[in-house]
Image (cartoon, rainbow, N blue to C red):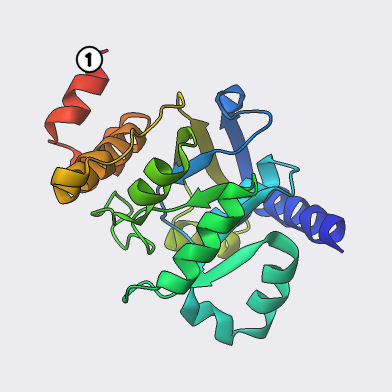
Amino acid sequence: MRNFVRGLIRVVANLIADIEVHDVQNVPASGGFVIATNHIGIIDIAMFHYVFDRYDMFIPVAEKWEKQAWIRWLAKNLNFIFIDRYNADLKTMRKMMEMMEAGNSLVIAPEGTRSRTGSLIEGKPGVAYLAAKSGFPVVPVGITGTEDRVIWGNIRRFRKSKVTLTAGQPFTIPPLDRNNREAALQGALDEIMCRIAAILPERYRGVYAEHPRLKELTKQ
């Protein structure tokens, strides 16, 4: 069934979009890793199953989608894990850590929700905590062209959308300083978000457009 679902994703994606994938070699071929990506449209999750034919990746999805039967069906076949975005969901966080410790890779949108503007909104610290705790390399990924209004608008006009997925260079988040944990967590989150911003076109950089770390990265 998993192969059927992934095949269906590829068929539908190719019908509605011209998809370009850049620098996919930056994603480790084996072992655990964290893919941290921007989130601008509902089809973003499908993009990773379009690109990668792997069963060791899992994706946190907002708990509100668990009410939808078709999402629950997808979850069983695409390794979704439902999480409460608004409260400290410690049970799910522990489950995610257990999956990472078992060698599974995490695909996560640090913003926690789709950006309604299409550009980056403020990230949440969960990804920084998981990356630091696991020691997994983080691969920043930038997605463009999957905004819901763009996708549906082009479908209505029988046009394909131009979608790109670009992987940046992997990096690691060091263990968090116990004596200054909050600042260390914020610094790690900023690093992740700025790495994503650096591989996105300027109009997608949003609240990180003027961040000093982004300016350093784009000068390199």
x and y percentages locating residue 77 in the rendered image: 75, 65
Q: Is residue 159 at least partly visible in the picture?
A: no
Q: Nearer the viewer, residue 173 or 158?
A: 173
The three-letter code of the residue at mark 1 reads: Lys
x 33%, y 73%: residue:
88
User: Which quadrant of the figure has residue 84?
Assistant: bottom left
In the image, is residue 150 above or below residue 141? below
- Count of numbered badges drawn on the protein: 1
> SS for tag 1?
helix
x and y percentages locating residue 98 in the rendered image: 57, 57
Q: Nearer the viewer, residue 14 or 33?
A: 33
Q: Residues within 10 Å of mark 1 (few under 14, many from 20)?
A: few
Q: Nearer the viewer, residue 154 or 22?
A: 22
x and y percentages locating residue 209 in the rendered image: 18, 38
x and y percentages locating residue 15 in the rendered image: 72, 52
In the image, is residue 82 above or below residue 20? below
Q: In which quadrant is the C terminus drawn?
A: top left
In the image, is residue 85 above or below residue 218? below
x 46%, y 57%: residue:
150
Q: Nearer the viewer, residue 71 or 154?
A: 71
x 35%, y 56%: residue:
126
Q: Is residue 161 left or right of residue 83?
A: right
In the image, is residue 179 above or below residue 116? above
Reading the image, the residue beneath label 1 is 219
Q: In which quadrant is the N terminus drawn?
A: bottom right
x 82%, y 59%: residue:
2
Q: Is residue 26 at least partly visible in the picture?
A: yes
